[in-house]
Image: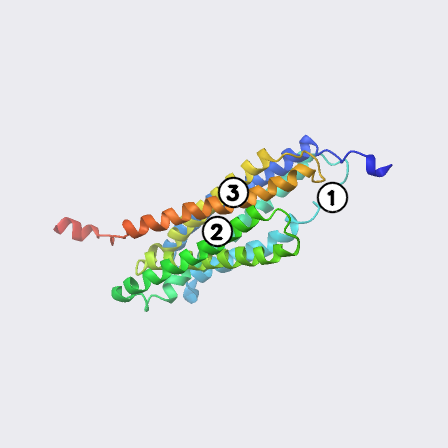
């Protein structure tokens, strides 16, 4: 008899509450990331601790203080608690968490070009290493494309899913590391703006992921808590289309860099501009 029961349908109010919290999280992250990058480049830091490590400490403390409250039931809430009260309870902790996450991430990433600044002082070395970096990035794209084709052609993967996951993990890790390396090479000696560059990069990442999640959720064929048979093939093709499509776009972007290299012009001081 229990097997004949319909799966419970997600309530519209529950979906709305989850959507509002997710949207708020993305907005808070999107606002904090570039602003923290901008401020991190221009604040002196706390004493001799340094500006990057100061922001890293502030972000770590913010995450530690807010993490437990986000992933637990709100204090004092019960079955009769209005959802607007729960929403009000979680909003401040989500904002603090996203602020802390952005501060920790951006300050950590902006340390990369500063730590290797001595190695990047030689322009010749940077130019000679850049083709190798691009080649490694292309290898990562090939691994992800191989994963996409494997999932497309193999409808019943079974235990073979571990092999496909290995390709996806290796390709994604390669692209992530090389992307950070290419960004560090782009910043080079202009470390005074490194945090803002990483903040802008992270902002684009968060917005793109948020939009992708919204589109996937809007196209989801099931409206129940339990996955219906249609969602199996839905996620199957989502893995193929998203990974394969992003790989093609990334390959085109890589080709465009080869044709039109990205260059940064150093800032000219006001005194120099007046003299010229």
- Where residue 76 is drawn, which disc sits there? 1
- Looking at the image, is mark 3 or mark 1 nearer the viewer? 3
Q: Is residue 226 left or right of residue 111?
A: right
| Distance between mark 3 and mark 2 Cα atoms | 10 Å
Q: Spot the residue most to the right.
A: 1
Q: Are marks 2 and 1 in contact (CB under 8 Å)?
A: no
- Where residue 145 is drawn, which disc sits there? 2
Image coords of residue 38 (percent x, y): 39, 50
Q: Earlier in the sequence, mark 3 or mark 1?
A: 1
Q: Is residue 216 left or right of residue 267?
A: right
Name the residue carrying label 3. Answer: 241
Image coords of residue 85 (percent x, y): 67, 36
Q: Spot the residue most to the front.
A: 153
Residue displayed at 76% across by 40% down: 78
Q: Are marks 3 and 2 in contact (CB under 8 Å)?
A: no
Q: Earlier in the sequence, mark 2 or mark 1?
A: 1
Q: Earlier in the sequence, mark 3 or mark 2?
A: 2
| Distance between mark 3 and mark 1 Cα atoms | 44 Å
């Amino acid at each position: 008899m229990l097997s004949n029961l319909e799966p419970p349908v997600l309530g519209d109010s529950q979906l709305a509450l989850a959507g509002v919290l997710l949207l708020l999280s993305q907005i808070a992250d999107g606002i904090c990331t570039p602003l923290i990058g901008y401020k991190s480049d221009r604040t002196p830091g706390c004493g001799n601790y340094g500006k990057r490590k100061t922001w890293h400490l502030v972000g770590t403390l913010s995450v530690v203080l807010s993490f437990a409250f986000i992933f637990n039931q709100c204090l004092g809430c019960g079955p009769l608690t209005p959802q607007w009260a729960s929403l009000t309870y979680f909003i401040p902790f989500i904002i603090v968490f996203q602020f802390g996450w952005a501060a920790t991430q951006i300050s950590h990433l902006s340390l990369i070009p500063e730590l290797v600044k001595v190695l990047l002082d030689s322009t010749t070395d940077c130019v000679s290493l850049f083709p190798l970096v691009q080649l490694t990035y292309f290898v990562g794209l090939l691994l992800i494309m191989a994963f996409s084709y494997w999932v497309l052609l193999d409808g019943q993967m079974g235990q073979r899913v571990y092999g496909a996951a290995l390709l996806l993990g290796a390709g994604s890790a390669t692209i992530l590391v090389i992307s950070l390396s290419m960004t560090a090479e782009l910043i080079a000696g202009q470390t005074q703006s490194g945090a803002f560059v990483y903040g802008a990069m992270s902002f684009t990442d968060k917005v793109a992921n948020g939009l992708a999640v919204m589109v996937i959720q809007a196209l989801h064929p099931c409206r129940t808590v339990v996955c219906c048979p249609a969602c199996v093939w839905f996620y199957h093709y989502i893995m193929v289309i998203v990974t394969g499509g992003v790989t093609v776009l990334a390959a085109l972007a890589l080709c465009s860099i080869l044709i039109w290299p990205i260059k940064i012009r150093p800032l000219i001081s006001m005194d120099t501009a007046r003299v010229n």
